[in-house]
Image: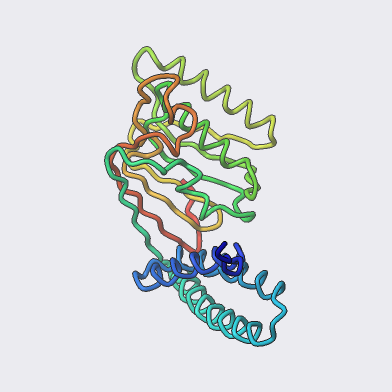
Amino acid sequence: MARSGPKQDPNSTSAVTLLKRAMELDSECHYQQALVCYQEGIDLLLQVLKATKDDTKKCNLRKKISDYMDRAEKIKEYLDQEKEEGRYHKQIKIEENATGFSYESLFQEYLNESVTEVWIEDPYIRQTHQLYNFLRFCEMLIKKPCKVKTIHLLTTLDEGSGREEQRMGLKEIKESLGNHGVFLELEYSSSIHDREIRFSNGWMVKIGRGLDYFKKPKGRFTLGYCDFDLRPCRETTVDIFHNKHTRKI
């Protein structure tokens, strides 16, 4: 029977994959994503270093970790400077029928403990499925790591028979948020058109279709009905900026 080679440390394998991806993103100037991969890869290498007994391997690992940390620090300094000067801009193009763009997947990178207040401007929080979209977005906001206390929604009133359903739906969402210690401020305008989301940590997200970029599921028991990462999307563009100060809507 042939002998198998030495067992590969899963942390080491994962670190190599992450750091390789970090360097690819770095070379493509996708610095925010690259920084995340560098940080996660470095954390895994530190775990490998802790478990390594061989002094030579330890020395090599320390050198690699030091090099990656230096690069990650330079990227962080660059991004901090971009944010400070209000020049940070990232664009995501969501293709027709693309999947993997749930609210968590799209926004999680920009949510942290400093997010206590959110401003949403979206003229289309009116129909039943749009109310559900807004509810899902709110559910994301009350989970860790966010510490959201206030959500401001500026939208338009339904001009047809759906007005009462819209009012009752938003009232129910407001009451439910209140049970979780979050205040929902509702405001209506007949003149808004732009769609914009701002977080109190300075991030601003503009989605061409607002929160309503998902396609209708083909049935109640089809994949994507519950998990929005599996829900096909309609084509749209997402622009992400960072400003030192967030303007209230």
Residue drawn at 69 percent across, 76 percent down:
52
Q: Is residue 60 above or below residue 94?
A: below
Residue 30 on image: x %, y %:
39, 66
Image spot of residue 40 (x, y percent): 57, 65
Q: Quadrant of residue 158?
A: top left
Question: Is 36 left, or right, of 48 in this rendering?
Answer: left
Residue 130: image location, x then y, percent: 42, 28
Residue 128 sits in quarter: top left
Can residue 125 be seen by looking at this rendering? yes
**Do we see residue 87 in this rendering?**
no
Q: How many marks?
A: 0
Residue at 29%, 43% (x, y): give it: 236
Residue in front for this viewpoint, 13 or 228:
13
Q: Residue at x 42, y 29 (%)?
A: 125
Residue 199: image x %, image y %? 52, 51
Relative to the observer, which residue lies in front, 80 or 223? 223
Q: What scheme was used to colour the molecule? A: rainbow
Residue at 37 percent of width and 48 percent of height? 206
- In the rendered image of this protein, does residue 222 appear above or below residue 146? above
236 or 232, which lies in front?
232
118 relative position to 34: left or right: right
Q: Which corner quadrant holds the N terminus? A: bottom right
